[in-house]
Amino acid sequence: MKIDPASLLSSRRRRRAALLAAVGVALSAGAVVAQQMPPPPAIEWTPRRLDQLDRNVRRLERAVTQRNAAGDPVLIQTDPEVITLQARVDGLDRRLRDIEATMQRVNADNERLTFALDESQRDNEAMRGLLTNADERLTRLEAALKAQAELNAPIEPNSASGNAEDDFAAAQRLTASGDAARALRAWETFVITWPEEDQAAEANYRLGDARWQAEDAEGAVQAYATSLRGWPQTRWAADAVIKLATALEASDRAPQACQALTEFGRRYAEDATTAQRSRAGQVSDRAECD
């Protein structure tokens, strides 16, 4: 059979054209599908995924090293993205180590500061206690000096209340409280402030007691003697005579003490109590009265 070259060439051209047309259709369809498909999501490189990638790379490196050692070399061209990620992982690792070292230094500094703060607080508490104690002692000292200055000041007429009855009651309260120094000054102030009042005689009697308590026998004699001017017939008069005789005998004035006891026997003994007469007898014996 005789083949016409021109017909064979024409047939090949037709098949080639048909193939190209089919490939073009397929490519067009693929392009359309590719355009219609959404792009793949970007990989989110979380620390966990980076760690996993790092482990996989290290295992791959170990496998390659083992094959190279066994005489079966493997040529691998490292992916640039892997290199970049590895560099990022290494950088993050260094930054983490730097942060850890910084945190350790900060914690150490915080511990030192905390200890120093605790020490400072303890020192402050101790200093506050010392200052409080010193302030209290200073306050007491100032009060004592003020009281001493008041007690040592000259006695002058002065009424805190403005009337004799209230001043007398105030002096009695000081006597009852046991504040002997202030009570003594109160009686001394009263007798020069209210010398003409009804309470003046008893105030001198109370002043005699206060001076006797202060071991001032001479002052007690003066106060008792003043209270007995006119030989008052009061509830305290008999006791005042015995105390006057006692103070005279204690200040080495036995004759005057005997004279006072004579007045006691003549003016007050009849109405005196048994205890008072007994005390008068004891003073008489000490003074060696007749």
Image (spheres, rainbow, N blue to C red):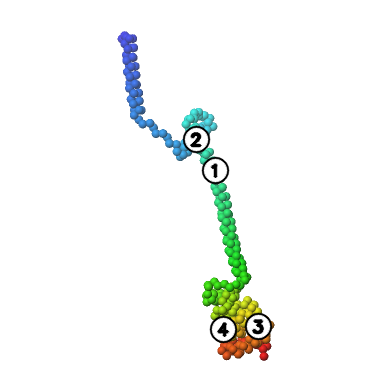
Per the model, the C-alpha gap separating discs 4 and 1 is 93 Å
Whether residue 126 can be seen here: no
- Closer to the chain start, of discs 2 and 1, is 2
**Mark 3, residues whose alpha carbon is within 10 Å: few (<14), some, or many (≥20)?**
many
Disc 4 residue type (three-letter): Trp
SS for callout 3: helix
Q: Which residue is mark 2?
A: 88
SS for callout 1: helix
- Closer to the chain start, of discs 2 and 3, is 2
Q: Which residue is mark 3?
A: 248
| Residue 113 location (% of width, % of height) | 56, 50
Q: Which residue is mark 4?
A: 236
- Closer to the chain start, of discs 1 and 3, is 1
SS for callout 2: helix
Task: Give the number of the disc on residue 6.
Answer: none
Q: Which residue is mark 1?
A: 102
| Residue 63 location (% of width, % of height) | 50, 34
Whether residue 100 can be seen here: yes
Mark 4 or 2, which is nearer the eye? 4
SS for callout 4: loop
- Closer to the chain start, of discs 4 and 1, is 1
13 to the left or right of 135: left
Per the model, the C-alpha gap separating discs 2 and 3 is 114 Å
Mark 2 or 3, which is nearer the eye? 3
